[in-house]
Amino acid sequence: MTETQVGRSPFDPPRDKAFKQELVTLIPHLRAFARTLTGDATAADDLAQDAMMKAWDARASFQLSTNMKAWTFMILRNQFYSEKRRSWRQSQLDQEAAERTLVAVDNPEAPVALDELRLSLRMLPAEQREALILVGAGGFAYEEAAEICGCAVGTVKSRVSRARRALQAILEAGAYDRDGGSAGDAMGSILADAERLSSLR
Amino acid sequence: MIEHVPMEDHRKGTAALDEARLRQQAIGVKLRQMFDEVVNEAVPDEFLDILRKADRPAGDK
Protein backbone atom coordinates (compact mmCIF):
# COMPACT_ATOMS: atom_id res chain seq x y z
CA MET A 1 0.00 0.00 0.00
CA THR A 2 1.43 3.38 -0.95
CA GLU A 3 1.45 6.40 1.29
CA THR A 4 -1.09 8.32 -0.76
CA GLN A 5 -3.80 5.74 -0.85
CA VAL A 6 -7.09 6.77 0.70
CA GLY A 7 -7.44 3.53 2.61
CA ARG A 8 -4.40 4.42 4.72
CA SER A 9 -4.86 4.29 8.45
CA PRO A 10 -6.17 7.61 9.76
CA PHE A 11 -3.86 7.26 12.74
CA ASP A 12 -0.62 8.91 11.70
CA PRO A 13 0.58 11.49 14.25
CA PRO A 14 3.53 13.00 12.30
CA ARG A 15 1.40 13.42 9.23
CA ASP A 16 -1.47 14.86 11.27
CA LYS A 17 0.92 17.32 12.83
CA ALA A 18 2.19 18.52 9.45
CA PHE A 19 -1.36 18.73 8.19
CA LYS A 20 -2.49 20.76 11.16
CA GLN A 21 0.42 23.16 10.89
CA GLU A 22 -0.49 23.91 7.33
CA LEU A 23 -4.18 24.13 8.13
CA VAL A 24 -3.48 26.74 10.81
CA THR A 25 -1.63 28.93 8.32
CA LEU A 26 -4.69 28.79 6.05
CA ILE A 27 -7.21 29.95 8.66
CA PRO A 28 -6.80 33.68 7.86
CA HIS A 29 -7.42 32.95 4.17
CA LEU A 30 -10.44 30.79 4.91
CA ARG A 31 -11.87 33.57 7.05
CA ALA A 32 -11.36 36.10 4.27
CA PHE A 33 -12.96 33.88 1.64
CA ALA A 34 -15.87 33.09 3.94
CA ARG A 35 -16.37 36.80 4.57
CA THR A 36 -16.72 37.48 0.87
CA LEU A 37 -19.20 34.63 0.47
CA THR A 38 -21.44 35.48 3.41
CA GLY A 39 -20.86 39.23 3.65
CA ASP A 40 -21.19 38.89 7.41
CA ALA A 41 -18.29 38.52 9.84
CA THR A 42 -20.03 36.25 12.35
CA ALA A 43 -21.56 33.93 9.77
CA ALA A 44 -18.20 33.90 7.99
CA ASP A 45 -16.34 32.70 11.07
CA ASP A 46 -18.93 29.98 11.67
CA LEU A 47 -18.50 28.89 8.07
CA ALA A 48 -14.71 29.02 8.26
CA GLN A 49 -14.73 26.95 11.47
CA ASP A 50 -17.01 24.35 9.92
CA ALA A 51 -14.77 24.17 6.86
CA MET A 52 -11.67 23.90 9.01
CA MET A 53 -13.16 20.95 10.92
CA LYS A 54 -14.37 19.29 7.73
CA ALA A 55 -10.85 19.58 6.35
CA TRP A 56 -9.44 18.15 9.56
CA ASP A 57 -11.87 15.23 9.52
CA ALA A 58 -11.05 14.55 5.87
CA ARG A 59 -7.28 14.87 6.34
CA ALA A 60 -6.71 11.20 5.52
CA SER A 61 -8.03 11.79 2.00
CA PHE A 62 -5.78 14.78 1.40
CA GLN A 63 -2.47 14.23 -0.36
CA LEU A 64 0.26 16.18 1.36
CA SER A 65 2.31 18.42 -0.92
CA THR A 66 -0.67 19.10 -3.18
CA ASN A 67 -2.45 22.47 -3.01
CA MET A 68 -4.03 22.50 0.42
CA LYS A 69 -5.24 26.06 0.08
CA ALA A 70 -7.32 25.21 -2.98
CA TRP A 71 -8.55 22.03 -1.29
CA THR A 72 -9.73 23.84 1.85
CA PHE A 73 -11.32 26.62 -0.20
CA MET A 74 -13.27 23.98 -2.09
CA ILE A 75 -14.47 22.47 1.17
CA LEU A 76 -15.51 25.88 2.46
CA ARG A 77 -17.32 26.71 -0.74
CA ASN A 78 -19.20 23.40 -0.79
CA GLN A 79 -20.17 23.91 2.82
CA PHE A 80 -21.46 27.39 2.06
CA TYR A 81 -23.63 26.29 -0.85
CA SER A 82 -24.99 23.21 0.84
CA GLU A 83 -26.08 25.32 3.81
CA LYS A 84 -27.53 27.89 1.49
CA ARG A 85 -29.45 25.28 -0.46
CA ARG A 86 -30.90 23.95 2.70
CA SER A 87 -32.23 27.32 3.81
CA TRP A 88 -33.02 28.73 0.43
CA ARG A 89 -33.68 26.25 -2.31
CA GLN A 90 -31.83 27.86 -5.14
CA SER A 91 -28.45 27.02 -6.57
CA GLN A 92 -28.64 28.67 -9.95
CA LEU A 93 -28.02 32.34 -9.31
CA ASP A 94 -29.23 34.83 -11.82
CA GLN A 95 -30.07 38.47 -12.11
CA GLU A 96 -33.08 38.05 -9.89
CA ALA A 97 -30.80 36.70 -7.21
CA ALA A 98 -28.48 39.65 -7.62
CA GLU A 99 -31.40 41.94 -6.94
CA ARG A 100 -32.39 39.99 -3.88
CA THR A 101 -28.83 40.35 -2.66
CA LEU A 102 -29.26 44.07 -3.04
CA VAL A 103 -32.39 43.95 -0.93
CA ALA A 104 -30.43 42.01 1.66
CA VAL A 105 -27.86 44.81 1.75
CA ASP A 106 -30.69 47.22 2.57
CA ASN A 107 -31.59 45.10 5.54
CA PRO A 108 -31.01 47.29 8.62
CA GLU A 109 -29.56 44.31 10.42
CA ALA A 110 -26.82 43.96 7.83
CA PRO A 111 -23.41 45.20 8.95
CA VAL A 112 -23.13 48.96 8.49
CA ALA A 113 -19.40 49.38 8.01
CA LEU A 114 -19.46 48.24 4.40
CA ASP A 115 -17.52 50.32 1.97
CA GLU A 116 -18.60 50.89 -1.59
CA LEU A 117 -16.59 48.00 -3.01
CA ARG A 118 -18.09 45.58 -0.54
CA LEU A 119 -21.58 46.83 -1.35
CA SER A 120 -20.90 46.61 -5.05
CA LEU A 121 -19.54 43.09 -4.74
CA ARG A 122 -22.72 41.98 -3.02
CA MET A 123 -24.64 43.05 -6.10
CA LEU A 124 -22.83 40.64 -8.37
CA PRO A 125 -24.27 37.20 -8.97
CA ALA A 126 -22.60 34.86 -6.46
CA GLU A 127 -20.81 32.80 -9.10
CA GLN A 128 -19.22 35.92 -10.58
CA ARG A 129 -18.29 37.28 -7.18
CA GLU A 130 -16.54 34.13 -6.03
CA ALA A 131 -14.65 33.75 -9.32
CA LEU A 132 -13.43 37.34 -9.10
CA ILE A 133 -12.42 36.97 -5.45
CA LEU A 134 -10.52 33.73 -6.02
CA VAL A 135 -8.58 35.02 -9.00
CA GLY A 136 -8.42 38.73 -8.20
CA ALA A 137 -7.76 38.59 -4.47
CA GLY A 138 -7.13 35.02 -3.39
CA GLY A 139 -4.16 34.57 -5.69
CA PHE A 140 -5.48 31.48 -7.47
CA ALA A 141 -4.79 30.65 -11.08
CA TYR A 142 -7.83 30.22 -13.33
CA GLU A 143 -7.23 26.47 -13.28
CA GLU A 144 -7.26 26.34 -9.49
CA ALA A 145 -10.35 28.52 -9.27
CA ALA A 146 -12.06 26.20 -11.74
CA GLU A 147 -11.24 23.25 -9.52
CA ILE A 148 -12.53 25.02 -6.45
CA CYS A 149 -15.79 25.99 -8.14
CA GLY A 150 -16.20 22.68 -9.94
CA CYS A 151 -16.50 24.21 -13.39
CA ALA A 152 -14.50 24.60 -16.59
CA VAL A 153 -11.53 26.96 -16.81
CA GLY A 154 -13.26 28.89 -19.60
CA THR A 155 -16.29 29.37 -17.39
CA VAL A 156 -14.13 30.89 -14.66
CA LYS A 157 -12.47 33.19 -17.16
CA SER A 158 -15.76 34.46 -18.48
CA ARG A 159 -17.20 34.88 -14.97
CA VAL A 160 -14.17 36.89 -13.88
CA SER A 161 -14.37 39.07 -16.94
CA ARG A 162 -18.10 39.67 -16.54
CA ALA A 163 -17.62 40.37 -12.83
CA ARG A 164 -14.93 42.95 -13.57
CA ARG A 165 -17.13 44.78 -16.05
CA ALA A 166 -20.19 44.69 -13.85
CA LEU A 167 -18.24 45.83 -10.80
CA GLN A 168 -16.79 48.74 -12.68
CA ALA A 169 -20.21 49.70 -14.00
CA ILE A 170 -21.76 49.51 -10.55
CA LEU A 171 -19.00 51.60 -8.99
CA GLU A 172 -19.18 54.20 -11.72
CA ALA A 173 -22.95 54.47 -11.56
CA GLY A 174 -22.82 54.70 -7.79
CA ALA A 175 -25.56 52.10 -7.87
CA TYR A 176 -24.35 50.59 -4.63
CA ASP A 177 -26.00 53.42 -2.73
CA ARG A 178 -28.05 51.80 -0.01
CA ASP A 179 -30.51 54.71 0.17
CA GLY A 180 -31.38 54.51 -3.49
CA GLY A 181 -34.88 53.13 -3.76
CA SER A 182 -34.48 52.45 -7.44
CA ALA A 183 -31.10 50.79 -7.03
CA GLY A 184 -32.65 47.45 -7.87
CA ASP A 185 -33.76 48.70 -11.27
CA ALA A 186 -30.42 50.38 -11.86
CA MET A 187 -28.73 47.10 -11.01
CA GLY A 188 -30.86 45.22 -13.50
CA SER A 189 -29.91 47.51 -16.33
CA ILE A 190 -26.25 47.58 -15.35
CA LEU A 191 -26.07 43.81 -15.33
CA ALA A 192 -27.87 43.68 -18.66
CA ASP A 193 -25.39 46.20 -20.08
CA ALA A 194 -22.41 44.33 -18.75
CA GLU A 195 -23.86 41.14 -20.16
CA ARG A 196 -24.35 42.75 -23.57
CA LEU A 197 -20.83 44.19 -23.54
CA SER A 198 -19.21 40.89 -22.74
CA SER A 199 -21.17 39.12 -25.44
CA LEU A 200 -19.76 41.61 -27.95
CA ARG A 201 -16.22 40.49 -27.36
CA MET B 1 -12.54 41.75 -33.30
CA ILE B 2 -14.00 45.26 -33.52
CA GLU B 3 -12.08 46.03 -36.72
CA HIS B 4 -15.05 47.37 -38.67
CA VAL B 5 -15.04 50.73 -36.84
CA PRO B 6 -13.51 53.78 -38.58
CA MET B 7 -9.89 54.63 -37.77
CA GLU B 8 -10.65 57.65 -35.57
CA ASP B 9 -13.22 55.82 -33.51
CA HIS B 10 -10.75 53.05 -33.24
CA ARG B 11 -8.15 55.37 -31.68
CA LYS B 12 -10.74 56.73 -29.29
CA GLY B 13 -11.66 53.18 -28.53
CA THR B 14 -8.06 52.37 -27.68
CA ALA B 15 -7.82 55.33 -25.30
CA ALA B 16 -11.04 54.26 -23.66
CA LEU B 17 -9.68 50.76 -23.35
CA ASP B 18 -6.55 52.05 -21.64
CA GLU B 19 -8.68 54.03 -19.25
CA ALA B 20 -10.84 51.02 -18.57
CA ARG B 21 -7.72 48.98 -17.91
CA LEU B 22 -6.48 51.55 -15.39
CA ARG B 23 -9.81 51.57 -13.64
CA GLN B 24 -9.75 47.80 -13.56
CA GLN B 25 -6.32 47.89 -11.98
CA ALA B 26 -7.61 50.25 -9.32
CA ILE B 27 -10.50 47.93 -8.60
CA GLY B 28 -8.10 44.99 -8.47
CA VAL B 29 -5.92 46.74 -5.90
CA LYS B 30 -8.95 47.58 -3.78
CA LEU B 31 -10.21 44.04 -4.05
CA ARG B 32 -6.94 42.62 -2.76
CA GLN B 33 -6.88 45.24 0.01
CA MET B 34 -10.34 44.21 1.09
CA PHE B 35 -9.38 40.54 1.16
CA ASP B 36 -6.00 41.09 2.83
CA GLU B 37 -7.61 43.21 5.50
CA VAL B 38 -9.40 40.11 6.75
CA VAL B 39 -6.37 37.87 6.18
CA ASN B 40 -4.33 40.19 8.40
CA GLU B 41 -6.87 40.22 11.22
CA ALA B 42 -5.88 38.27 14.31
CA VAL B 43 -7.45 34.83 14.17
CA PRO B 44 -10.04 34.45 16.96
CA ASP B 45 -8.86 31.99 19.66
CA GLU B 46 -11.95 29.92 18.97
CA PHE B 47 -10.40 28.51 15.83
CA LEU B 48 -7.34 27.14 17.56
CA ASP B 49 -9.40 25.94 20.53
CA ILE B 50 -11.61 23.91 18.24
CA LEU B 51 -8.64 22.43 16.47
CA ARG B 52 -6.95 21.63 19.77
CA LYS B 53 -10.03 19.80 21.01
CA ALA B 54 -10.18 17.84 17.78
CA ASP B 55 -6.78 16.45 18.74
CA ARG B 56 -7.98 14.61 21.76
CA PRO B 57 -9.57 11.40 20.61
CA ALA B 58 -12.99 11.36 22.23
CA GLY B 59 -12.99 7.63 22.78
CA ASP B 60 -12.66 5.30 19.85
CA LYS B 61 -15.19 6.65 17.40
Image (cartoon, rainbow, N blue to C red):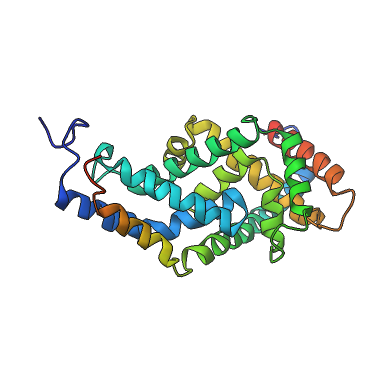
The quadrant of the picture occupied by the C terminus of chain A is: top right
Relative to the observer, which residue lies in front, A23 or A83? A83
Percent of width and height locating residue A34? 52, 51
Percent of width and height locating residue A82? 53, 35
The quadrant of the picture occupied by the N terminus of chain A is: top left
Relative to the observer, which residue lies in front, A175 or A59? A59
Quadrant in the rendering for residue A81: top right
Relative to the observer, which residue lies in front, A182 or B18? A182
A32 horizontally vs B49: left or right:
right
Quadrant in the rendering for residue A84: top right
Is residue A132 in view from this perspective? yes
Residue drawn at x 19%, y 30% is A7
Percent of width and height locating residue A133? 55, 50
Residue drawn at x 44%, y 57% is A29
Percent of width and height locating residue B14? 70, 49
Residue that extends furthest to the front in the rendered view of this protein: B59
Quadrant in the rendering for residue A157: top right
Residue that extends furthest to the left in the rendered view of this protein: A1
A199 horizontally vs B52: left or right:
right
Residue drawn at x 71%, y 53% is A120
A11 horizontally vs A68: left or right:
left
